[in-house]
Amino acid sequence: MTGPLILGIESSCDETGVGIVRGRELLANEVASSVDQHARWGGVVPEVASRAHLQAMVPALERALAKADVDLTEIDAIAVTAGPGLMGALVIGLASAKALAASLNKPLYGVNHLVGHVAVDILEHGPLDMPCGALLVSGGHTNLLKVDDLTSSITEVGTTIDDAAGEAYDKVARLLGLGYPGGPIVDKAAASGDPKAIAFPRGLTARHDLAKHRFDFSFSGLKTAVARWVETARLEGREVPIDDVCASFQEAVADVLTAKAVDMCDHYGLKQFVIGGGVAANSRLRTLLEERLAARGVALRRPRPGLCTDNGAMIAILGSEVVTAGLPPSASDIGADSGMP
Ligand code: KG4
Ligand code: ZN
């Protein structure tokens, strides 16, 4: 395989990621997570995340280079997450990338973390067919996107009007006392529960909501409905069937994400659809989406779960696409943009 040798650095939240790709081939993907340090707080503590990035960055870089069996001097360009994310966390990755670019005299490309989540599947399943639909579901974002060109033309078709899907998972896990991050724990508990046990609401699917929010999402009502249901059960002295609550909640999330994704593909006549972000690792979302899209003749592209959550390979592959597209490098004074759209 040929193509540019790209080093990708990710530090937008609680994962320090260093990935190396050659063209569209994955050579290394080293991730160091500070998730255990945040667990007792039930969410990411920005200061703790920044300090963990500072400690983990150079060791992760060394491991990635060893794994890829390349020397730092062979790298053609450095890609780094410039946003969105936690400001204090982003600047650690940016400072590291700038230092490398300056000392090696190589071009630096600041890229969008969210587009990285869309791009990562290229490493597993090859180039995306354009135009394609994308569902980006993470701890901070829930977006339906129409991708006409990965590096220059992505349109947001829908978004959440309140909580992100991953945030809903984390909050529900917290109210059930299951720990953090909630997504994987709820996913596992749901496997032994009944998804039809409790009829939780599907946000923004009523006819009057669809008129204004056809492709948008809302998860805060669902989270409140779960909280009410659990509270009532506890007040009435009933045992809370954790597995059933998790399965029913998960079904509601997967159902609404999937329904709107399918509607979007119909509306825009899309034939390919890609998912990305931590919640794209969810087992029910993956199977339900596959079923419903296949019934419409739309091919689903799902990166393996390990590539859905934050990592450096997604930044490296996006950097590789940007370099190959011939886009100019970022200025040497590029800053972090925590609210990058
Ligand atoms: O993309 P990501 O690693 O970080 C952000 O950019 O936010 O996503 C993290 C989110 C968390 O909310 C986590 O609970 C959720 O993804 N998540 C899952 C699963 N694995 C991670 N949610 C549902 N099911 C999963 N299997
Ligand atoms: Zn992410």
Image (cartoon, helix red, strand yellow):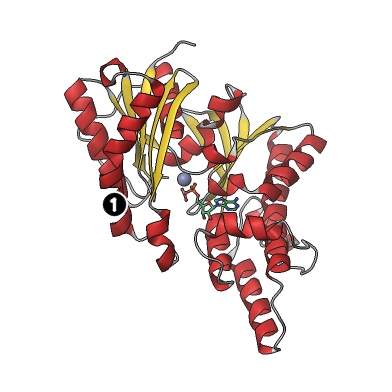
Side of 130 where 46 appears, left or right = left
Which residue is pictured at 68% across the width and 36% down the height?
268
Q: Position of residue 151 (x, y in %)?
A: 46, 27
| Residue depicted at x 58% and y 27% | 124
Left or right, 171 with respect to 326, comes to right
Q: Nearer the viewer, residue 103 or 204?
A: 103
> Compared to 73, does 179 lie above or below?
below
Q: Amino acid at mark 1?
A: Ser
Q: Secondary structure at mark 1?
A: helix
Give the answer, above or below, for where 118 lies relative to 209.
Answer: above
Q: Which residue is mark 1?
A: 50
Mark 1: few/some/many CA within 10 Å (<14, 14-19, 20+): many
Q: Name the foreground residue: 190 vs 88.
A: 190
Residue 260 appears anywhere in the view: no
Q: Position of residue 294 (x, y in %)?
A: 78, 35
| x 74%, y 46%: residue | 288
